[in-house]
C-alpha cells in the first residue's frame, strides 16, 4: 500500500465545514477503483463484479493521507471504507461497490454513502460523465479514462494507473468540497453546439451528508426535499 500525506496548507478538511451545521462527521473517505477488464470482456455491465481490480486509491480526511492499493492489498481499502463516517465517490453505489463485492461480503450499500453521481441525477434527472463536471467546475480535466487505465495495466504501467486513479480521487474530493461550500457545480452540455455551461444546484448537499451521517448513528430526523430526492435515486439503483 502506498501512502502520501498532503501538506497541511493544502488540506481540504470538510469535517470543519460540516461541523458548523451541528453534526461532526469524523473520517470522510473518498475513493476510486480501476479495473483489469472492460465491461464487454465480462459479458456486459450486469457482470461488473467480474471486472477485477487493478488498483484503488483513497483519501482519508481524518489522517490527511492519500493511499493506493494494488489487488492483493484491497482488504486495506475495505477496512477504510467500513470505518469511515461518510464515504464519498462518483458512481460508487452502481460501479465501485459491485467490483469490490468480488473481494468482500460487506454490505457497502448500508454505509453512509454520498454518491455524487446519484446526487447529480437527483437534481437533473439524468446522469453525467465526471469529466464534463470537472472541466466546467474545476477548470481542469481527468488524466485519462477507464479504457486507457486497463491498457496501461496490461502494459505493466502500474504506476501510471495509480497516478490516474489518484487524480480521480483528488477531483472527487475537490468537487465535493466545491458543492458543499459554494452550493453549485457546473457542467458542459455536450448535447448542444458550443457545449454551453449549465449550473447544478448543490445547496442541499450539506444537509444531505449530515442526514446520512446522523442516520448511520441512529439519530432520526426528517430529510429535506433535496435529500429525499437523493434517497429516492439511491433506492432506484442510481
Image: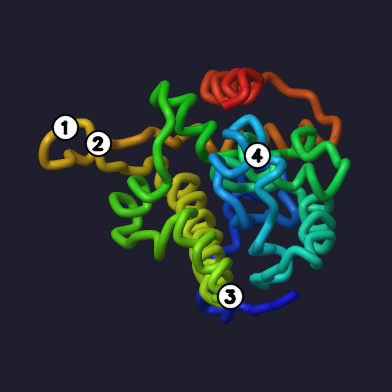
Image position, residue 7 (x, y; %): 57, 81
Q: Which residue is mark 2?
A: 189
Residue at image location 86% in from the left, 42% down from the top: 106
Contact? badges 2 and 1 (CB < 8 Å): yes
Which of the two marks, 4 or 1, is nearer to us in this view?
4
Q: How far is the residue under mark 3 from the one under mark 2?
A: 36 Å
Other residues around mark 3 within 10 Å, as few (<14) / some (14–19) / many (≥20) = few
Quadrant in which residue 62 is drawn: bottom right
97 on left or right of 122: right
The residue mark sitting in front, 3 or 1, is 3
Q: Position of residue 178 (x, y in %)?
A: 44, 51
Q: Which residue is mark 1?
A: 192
Q: CA distance from mark 3 to mark 1?
A: 39 Å
- Would you name the residue on which mark 4 appears? 48
Q: Mark 3 = which residue?
A: 156
Which residue appears at 72% of the width and 68% of the height? 70
The residue shown at (54%, 18%) is: 225
Callout 1 crowding tier (Cα within 10 Å): few <14, some 14–19, many ≥20? few
Amino acid at each position: 500500500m502506498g501512502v502520501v500525506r498532503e501538506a497541511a496548507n493544502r488540506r481540504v478538511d470538510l469535517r470543519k465545514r460540516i461541523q458548523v451545521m451541528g453534526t461532526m462527521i469524523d473520517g470522510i473517505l473518498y475513493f476510486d477503483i480501476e479495473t483489469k477488464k472492460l465491461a464487454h470482456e465480462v459479458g456486459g455491465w450486469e457482470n461488473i463484479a467480474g471486472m477485477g481490480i487493478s488498483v484503488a486509491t483513497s483519501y482519508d480526511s481524518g489522517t490527511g493521507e492519500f493511499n493506493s492499493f494494488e489487488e492483493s492489498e484491497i482488504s486495506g481499502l475495505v477496512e477504510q471504507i467500513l470505518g469511515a463516517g461518510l464515504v464519498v465517490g462518483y458512481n460508487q453505489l452502481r460501479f465501485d461497490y459491485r467490483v469490490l463485492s468480488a473481494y468482500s461480503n460487506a454490505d457497502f450499500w448500508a454505509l453512509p454513502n454520498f454518491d455524487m453521481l446519484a446526487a447529480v441525477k437527483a437534481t437533473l434527472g439524468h446522469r453525467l460523465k465526471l469529466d464534463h463536471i470537472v472541466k466546467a467546475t474545476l477548470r481542469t480535466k481527468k488524466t485519462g479514462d477507464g479504457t486507457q487505465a486497463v491498457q496501461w495495466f496490461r502494459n505493466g504501467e502500474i504506476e501510471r494507473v495509480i497516478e490516474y486513479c489518484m487524480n480521480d480521487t483528488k477531483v472527487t474530493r475537490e468537487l465535493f468540497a466545491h458543492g458543499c461550500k459554494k452550493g453549485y457545480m457546473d457542467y458542459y452540455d455536450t448535447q448542444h453546439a458550443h457545449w454551453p455551461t449549465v449550473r447544478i444546484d448543490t445547496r442541499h448537499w450539506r444537509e444531505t451528508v449530515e442526514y446520512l451521517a446522523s442516520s448511520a448513528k441512529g439519530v432520526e430526523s426528517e430529510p429535506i426535499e433535496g435529500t429525499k430526492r437523493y434517497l429516492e435515486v439511491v433506492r432506484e439503483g442510481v
